[in-house]
Amino acid sequence: MPYEDHSPGLNAGDLTGAPGVPSARAEATAWETPQMTSPGRPRIAALDVLRGFALCEILLANIQLIADGGTAVVTQPMGDWDPWLGLPIFSLLFGIGFSLLLDSAAHRVPRPWLVLLRRLLTLLAIGLVHMLLWPGEVLTKYAIAGLLVLLPSTWLPRWAVAGLAAALVTVAVISGGGPLLIAGLFLLGSALVRYGVIEKIERSTRGPLLLGLAFAAGLASALWVQASMRAVGATTYLPATTTLADLLLAGIYVCVLLVLLRTPLRPVLQFVFAPLGRMALTNYLTATLLVLAASHILGLPIGQSSSAAFQAAGVILAAQWLFSALWLRRYRQGPMEWLWRWATWARRPALRIPRAELIP
């Protein structure tokens, strides 16, 4: 049986699992919209914002490679800013969503591991189809890492998950990244849920602020070490320090966003990033189609020109934001999120928002 849940008590009506009855816990992954323990509590808006922000970075990181089928010699569209930072953020969010789903399944079905297995196998199938268009896509890697690491971790106590996460991330940093980093961040996200950190994410300012300052100090140290090694011509450990610096910078971005969400800028951040984040799977997949269309049908030099890549990414994200915002006015989830949820729970969920609940 998966790990024992130590969350606050729930109403009996929350546990029925009948169609149309809200779940006791969030039914989400990095690509879906998490909600908190009971139907009356608000969605974790911070995760929507983080997911939308990471989605933008991932498009910027991949757009030239997608346009040229993975063969482009990429220069950063954003100069010195490294859009690769979206990948560790998404990996962390995927682990968070997995444990939120586990909580939901544990209260609704006798075999929650089967729900998780269907979830990951469906993601694998989606990824394999997507790979026909974009060989560098990440869904297959996430599904395989989930099957090999996340699913077995549900039988471990939370301290073991946290310890294994620390070990995998450390080894991944030393070796310069790779699949171990994804697996480690998956487990780290899962541990954050199981230790109750995610339940407090909307209520804390001091925690993200102090953690962000610690990450900034660590980043400064890593960059100093990098500069010192380059000065003496020592390149052996440069991949490790680069991976560490990227992770710390990603952590700083996350902390900054969490702090800003506790300020008057919260409505602006939610307006800009939340619609993209709530339909992240749909937007991730359609971005590939839009990039390929812009490159091969319209003939835009995305793979060869950084400025063209940046402009195309801006137009694509703007179009996806508009579509997402309009879609979510009438529907509970994005189309791909809805299909994924259907496969996960093996029953068709409601998609359209009832007319009485529509926002005028």
Image: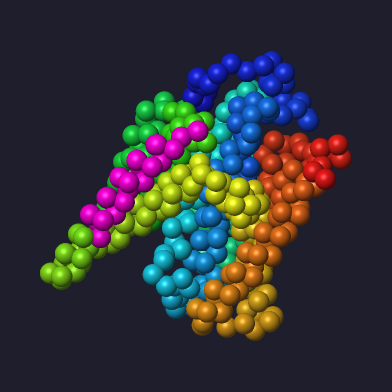
Q: Residue at x 76, y 54 (%)?
A: 326
Q: Quadrant of the C terminus?
A: top right
Image x and y of residue 171, in percent: 29, 48
Image x and y of residue 324, in percent: 70, 55
Q: Residue furthest left?
A: 232
Question: Quadrant of residue 228 in the image?
Answer: bottom left
Q: Residue at x 30, y 60 (%)?
A: 242
Please, is residue 189 above or below residue 81 in the view? above
- Residue 91 visible to the viewer: no
Q: Residue at x 51, y 82 (%)?
A: 305
Q: Residue furthest front?
A: 264
Q: Nearer the viewer, residue 6 or 358?
A: 358
Please, is residue 296 above or below residue 120 in the view? below
Image x and y of residue 93, in percent: 51, 45
- Residue 241 visible to the viewer: yes
Q: Which residues are magenta?
A: 203-223
Left or right relative to 227: residue 31: right
Report the predominant secondary structure element of the magenta stretch. helix
